[in-house]
Image (cartoon, rainbow, N blue to C red):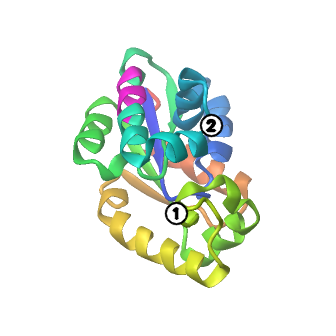
Amino acid sequence: MRIYLTGFMASGKSTVGPNVAARLGCTFLDLDRLIAVHDRRSIPQIFAQDGEARFRELETNALHQTANRDDLVVALGGGALVDDDNRAFAKEHGRIVYLKVDPDTVLDRVVDEADRRPLLQDEDGTPLPRQQMRERIERMLEERSPAYTDAHATVDARSSVSSVVDAVTDTIRRNGWDE
């Protein structure tokens, strides 16, 4: 079993994932953390020093490493499955669960940590003003929507962590993906 959690930034992938993995008796892997450990730099540093394109290469490499392990719950980066090849890879090697959030939920969750969110910063690395941040979130959610909705299942991730964990776990079990 391999479960890939996808969704926009702050949808709860890295928070929900360990809890889902624990309930299913699986290993949890956060793809962004794997990249940062392997590259010995934070994600914002990679973006700042090498750009988004290089980060996406590292992300693809890390995603491909997940195929070597079973009984895994993987939190993907918010843009990982925008790439058609990455999405096809994840669909071939596991099941994808989309944690769906709306722009206001995202904004509420990230506004105080935008300094750690490269996609919510200007070209100088300064967090965008709140309204511009919301507009960027809306645009990115719209652009990524086809990739997200191509998941095997969608779970509303606007509620409490425990409710989202319950919903994801129930979805996995109901579909027999835990067998």
The quadrant of the rendering that contains the N terminus is top left
Q: Nearer the viewer, residue 56 or 51?
A: 51
Amino acid type shown at disc 1: Glu
- Which residue occupies 29% across, 64% down? 146
What secondary structure prevails in the magenta region?
Answer: helix
Vertical relation: 15 (above or below) 11: above
Mark 1, Cα crowd under 10 Å, few <14 / some 14-19 / many 20+, is few
User: Going by the image, does 7 lie left or right of 81?
Assistant: right
Whether residue 24 is visible, yes or no, is no
* Image quarter of residue 118: bottom right
Horizontal and vertical percent position of residue 5: 49, 44
- Which residue occupies 25% across, 33% down? 92
Horizontal and vertical percent position of residue 142: 38, 73
Vertical relation: 116 (above or below) 26: below
The answer to if 64 sits in the magenta stretch is yes
Give the magenta-colored segment's residue range.
60-65
The answer to if 90 sits in the magenta stretch is no
Give the secondary structure at mark 2: loop
Q: Earlier in the sequence, mark 2 or mark 1?
A: 2
Mark 2, Cα crowd under 10 Å, few <14 / some 14-19 / many 20+, is some
> Can you identify the residue that label 1 sits on?
123
Most extreme residue toward the bottom is: 131
> Can you identify the residue that label 2 sits on?
42
Give the secondary structure at mark 1: loop
Question: Comparing marks 2 and 1, which lies closer to the viewer?
Answer: 1
Most extreme residue toward the front is: 124
Label 2 vs label 1: CA separation?
18 Å
Horizontal and vertical percent position of residue 145: 36, 66
Amino acid type shown at disc 2: Ser
The quadrant of the rendering that contains the C terminus is top left
